[in-house]
């Protein structure tokens, strides 16, 4: 199984779908990076890589995932939010797309 197949399986499993995944690979071509990103990778790091830089990227992605989780937990659903604001249909669509 390669990294792309691993990503497909992670994203297909609701329990694992929100795990931020970073590709660390010897592939350096744009097509490979685009495929990894299209499958949901949050970052793509080519070898050789800097360990301190990779650790910082991991830290940043985990912090971002935590902020996203906290935001979702404290934000009402789109349907409830839109229902409480008559005439807010355009704003509702934008807000729901951001989620």
Image: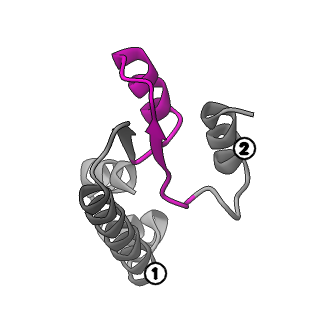
Which of these two is toward me, 64 or 82?
64
Q: Residue at x 37, y 69 (%)?
A: 68
The residue pinned by badge 1 equals 73
- Residue 4 image position (x, y, % from top left): 61, 32
Q: Residue at x 24, y 57 (%)?
A: 53
- Horizontal placement of 85 versus 76: left or right? left
Describe the colour scheme in one phrase.
one colour
| Location of the C terminus (image quadrant) | bottom left
Question: In the rendered view, would you say 16 is above or below 45?
Answer: below
- Residue 54 image position (x, y, % from top left): 32, 56
Q: Residue at x 32, y 64 (%)?
A: 55
The residue pinned by badge 2 equals 9
Which of these two is toward me, 90 or 87?
90
Q: Mark 2 or mark 1, which is nearer the start of the sequence?
A: 2
- Horizontal placement of 23 versus 28: left or right? right
Residue extent of the magenta highlight: 18-42
């Amino acid at each position: 199984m390669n990294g792309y197949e691993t990503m497909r399986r992670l994203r297909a499993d609701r329990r694992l779908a929100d795990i931020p995944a970073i590709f660390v690979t010897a592939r350096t071509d744009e097509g490979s990076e685009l495929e990894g990103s299209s499958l949901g990778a949050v970052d793509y790091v080519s070898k050789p890589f800097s360990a301190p830089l990779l650790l910082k990227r991991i830290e940043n992605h985990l912090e971002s995932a935590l902020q996203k989780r906290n935001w979702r937990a404290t934000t009402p659903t789109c349907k409830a939010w839109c229902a409480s604001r008559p005439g807010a249909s355009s704003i509702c669509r934008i807000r729901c797309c951001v989620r």
